[in-house]
Amino acid sequence: MRLTARTWIDAYLTRLRLADIPGFVVAHGDDTGGAVLVKLNTLDGQAVAFQRSFDIVTGARKWMVLSEGPESQVDQSISRQRGFDPDLWVVEVEDRQGRHLLDEPGLAD
């Protein structure tokens, strides 16, 4: 059984808080079925946007880079995605060390 988008977001924000990593919702999508993008802002003018996708060989879900580079460029990419999908959630993580925790067990599910 898959988690709702809202439940996943709440759990992710809790994990970030426990690691003392600031994270917040910048775009609220559909509570049940909305897709999620995570923007990592390294606070030096650079950013990376991650999207969840499927590995077609294994069927596993994993986080892939959607866009990376200057923050303004990443923001434009996220805006385009929101134009295609108004149910899309966007979570922004701010960490100078580049931590996002997406590689931890359970966060790709």
Image: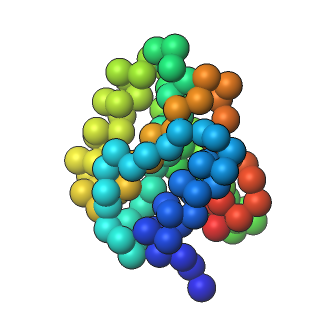
Q: Is residue 9 above or below residue 40?
A: below
Q: How is the image coloured?
A: rainbow
Q: In terms of image quadrants, where is residue 29?
A: bottom left
Query: Measuring 74% from the left and 53% from the top, which residue is drawn there?
Result: 104
In the rendered image, residue 20, in percent from the top left (x then y), is placed at: 64, 41
In the rendered image, residue 25, in percent from the top left (x then y), is placed at: 39, 49
The residue lying toward the viewer, choosing from 37 and 23, is: 23
Q: Is residue 54 above or below residue 102?
A: below
Query: Measuring 39% from the left and 75% from the top, which residue is drawn there?
Result: 32
Query: Measuring 35% from the left and 39% from the top, which residue is drawn there?
Result: 78
* Whether residue 47 can be seen here: yes
In the rendered image, residue 64, in percent from the top left (x then y), is placed at: 60, 45
Quadrant, the N terminus: bottom right
Q: Number of marks in the image?
A: 0
Quadrant, the C terminus: bottom right
Query: Measuring 38% from the left and 66% from the top, which residue is drawn there?
Result: 34
* Whether residue 68 can be seen here: no
The residue lying toward the viewer, choosing from 71 and 42, is: 42
Furthest-top residue in this view? 44
In the rendered image, residue 54, in percent from the top left (x then y), is placed at: 61, 61
The residue lying toward the viewer, choosing from 78 and 99, is: 99
